[in-house]
Image (tube, grey):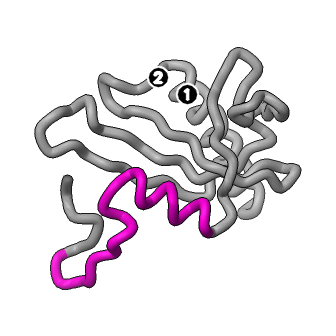
Amino acid sequence: MKSATEPGKPEIPWMKSLSSCTNRMKEEGYKEDFQVNEDGLSTFDNSKNFKPQDVQIVNFYRFEGESDPGDNTILYVIETNDGTKGTLVDGYGAYADENVSKFIVEVEKIQKVKVSDLHA
Protein backbone atom coordinates (compact mmCIF):
# COMPACT_ATOMS: atom_id res chain seq x y z
CA MET A 1 0.00 0.00 0.00
CA LYS A 2 1.23 3.49 -0.74
CA SER A 3 1.88 5.83 2.15
CA ALA A 4 -1.14 7.84 3.24
CA THR A 5 1.04 10.89 3.76
CA GLU A 6 3.41 13.00 1.75
CA PRO A 7 7.19 12.60 2.18
CA GLY A 8 8.41 14.56 5.18
CA LYS A 9 5.01 14.57 6.89
CA PRO A 10 4.16 12.26 9.80
CA GLU A 11 2.22 9.09 9.01
CA ILE A 12 -1.35 8.70 10.22
CA PRO A 13 -1.55 5.14 11.60
CA TRP A 14 -5.32 4.72 11.17
CA MET A 15 -5.00 5.38 7.42
CA LYS A 16 -2.77 2.36 6.79
CA SER A 17 -5.61 -0.10 6.18
CA LEU A 18 -9.27 -0.14 5.25
CA SER A 19 -10.23 -1.81 8.53
CA SER A 20 -8.36 0.69 10.74
CA CYS A 21 -9.79 3.64 8.78
CA THR A 22 -13.32 2.20 9.01
CA ASN A 23 -12.87 1.70 12.75
CA ARG A 24 -11.70 5.32 13.12
CA MET A 25 -14.75 6.58 11.22
CA LYS A 26 -17.01 4.56 13.54
CA GLU A 27 -15.27 6.17 16.52
CA GLU A 28 -16.05 9.56 14.94
CA GLY A 29 -19.76 8.70 14.72
CA TYR A 30 -20.02 7.21 11.21
CA LYS A 31 -21.58 4.00 12.53
CA GLU A 32 -23.87 2.82 9.71
CA ASP A 33 -22.66 0.39 7.06
CA PHE A 34 -24.29 1.55 3.84
CA GLN A 35 -24.94 -0.39 0.65
CA VAL A 36 -26.35 0.58 -2.73
CA ASN A 37 -29.39 -1.27 -4.07
CA GLU A 38 -32.16 -0.61 -6.59
CA ASP A 39 -33.74 1.92 -4.17
CA GLY A 40 -30.54 3.96 -3.76
CA LEU A 41 -28.33 4.04 -0.68
CA SER A 42 -29.58 2.01 2.26
CA THR A 43 -28.49 1.04 5.71
CA PHE A 44 -27.21 -2.53 5.88
CA ASP A 45 -30.45 -3.71 7.53
CA ASN A 46 -32.50 -1.86 4.84
CA SER A 47 -34.34 0.12 7.52
CA LYS A 48 -33.56 3.44 5.77
CA ASN A 49 -33.18 4.33 2.09
CA PHE A 50 -31.73 7.49 0.60
CA LYS A 51 -31.72 9.04 -2.87
CA PRO A 52 -28.64 10.88 -4.21
CA GLN A 53 -30.11 14.26 -3.24
CA ASP A 54 -30.34 13.03 0.39
CA VAL A 55 -26.63 12.21 0.65
CA GLN A 56 -23.43 14.16 1.20
CA ILE A 57 -19.99 12.62 0.76
CA VAL A 58 -18.00 14.03 3.68
CA ASN A 59 -14.70 12.42 2.70
CA PHE A 60 -13.20 9.40 0.97
CA TYR A 61 -10.07 7.30 1.32
CA ARG A 62 -8.43 5.05 -1.27
CA PHE A 63 -6.45 1.95 -0.43
CA GLU A 64 -4.23 0.18 -2.95
CA GLY A 65 -3.22 -3.45 -2.65
CA GLU A 66 0.52 -4.03 -2.94
CA SER A 67 0.32 -7.11 -5.14
CA ASP A 68 -3.34 -7.65 -6.06
CA PRO A 69 -5.30 -4.97 -7.95
CA GLY A 70 -8.44 -6.65 -6.58
CA ASP A 71 -7.48 -5.19 -3.20
CA ASN A 72 -8.01 -1.63 -4.47
CA THR A 73 -10.84 -0.16 -2.43
CA ILE A 74 -12.36 3.18 -1.63
CA LEU A 75 -14.10 4.11 1.61
CA TYR A 76 -16.77 6.82 1.32
CA VAL A 77 -17.67 8.69 4.51
CA ILE A 78 -21.32 9.71 4.22
CA GLU A 79 -23.88 11.82 6.03
CA THR A 80 -27.55 11.88 5.03
CA ASN A 81 -30.17 14.60 5.23
CA ASP A 82 -31.70 13.02 8.35
CA GLY A 83 -28.34 12.93 10.16
CA THR A 84 -27.54 9.26 9.57
CA LYS A 85 -23.76 8.88 9.36
CA GLY A 86 -21.84 5.91 8.01
CA THR A 87 -19.50 4.47 5.43
CA LEU A 88 -19.75 2.79 2.05
CA VAL A 89 -16.97 0.57 0.70
CA ASP A 90 -16.40 -0.12 -2.99
CA GLY A 91 -13.66 -1.40 -5.22
CA TYR A 92 -12.27 1.02 -7.77
CA GLY A 93 -10.99 0.79 -11.27
CA ALA A 94 -11.90 -2.49 -12.96
CA TYR A 95 -13.23 -3.83 -9.65
CA ALA A 96 -15.77 -1.08 -8.93
CA ASP A 97 -19.42 -2.03 -8.46
CA GLU A 98 -21.33 -0.39 -11.31
CA ASN A 99 -24.35 0.45 -9.12
CA VAL A 100 -22.21 2.10 -6.45
CA SER A 101 -20.29 4.05 -9.09
CA LYS A 102 -23.49 5.36 -10.69
CA PHE A 103 -24.91 6.38 -7.32
CA ILE A 104 -21.72 8.20 -6.30
CA VAL A 105 -21.60 10.04 -9.65
CA GLU A 106 -25.16 11.27 -9.07
CA VAL A 107 -24.30 12.45 -5.55
CA GLU A 108 -21.20 14.27 -6.85
CA LYS A 109 -23.25 16.01 -9.58
CA ILE A 110 -25.74 17.25 -6.98
CA GLN A 111 -22.95 18.42 -4.65
CA LYS A 112 -21.30 20.33 -7.51
CA VAL A 113 -24.59 22.10 -8.28
CA LYS A 114 -25.04 23.04 -4.60
CA VAL A 115 -21.51 24.50 -4.45
CA SER A 116 -22.01 26.43 -7.71
CA ASP A 117 -25.24 27.91 -6.29
CA LEU A 118 -23.17 29.49 -3.52
CA HIS A 119 -21.19 31.46 -6.09
CA ALA A 120 -24.22 32.66 -8.02
Residue 52 x/y as whole percent? 73, 35
- As helix, strand or loop, the secondary structure at mark 1 comes to helix
Q: Is the residue marked by circle 2 packed among few (<14), some (14-19), or many (20+) residues within 10 Å?
A: some
Classified by dominant secondary structure, the portion drawn in magenta counts as helix
Q: Is residue 29 above or below residue 66?
A: below
The image quarter containing residue 10 is bottom left
Instruction: Say left or right for 36 vs 47.
Output: left
Q: Which image quarter holds the C terminus? A: bottom right
From the top left corner, tell me how far across and down residue 22 is, in percent: 50, 55
Q: Which residues are magenta?
A: 7-27
Amino acid bearing label 1: Val
Residue 99 vertical placement versus 110 (above, below):
above
Q: Which mark is residue 97?
A: 2
Asked if labels 2 and 1 touch by Cβ distance under 8 angstroms, the answer is yes
* Label 2: element kind: loop
Q: Residue at x 63, y 31 (%)?
A: 35
Q: Amino acid at mark 2?
A: Asp
Q: Is residue 42 magenta?
A: no
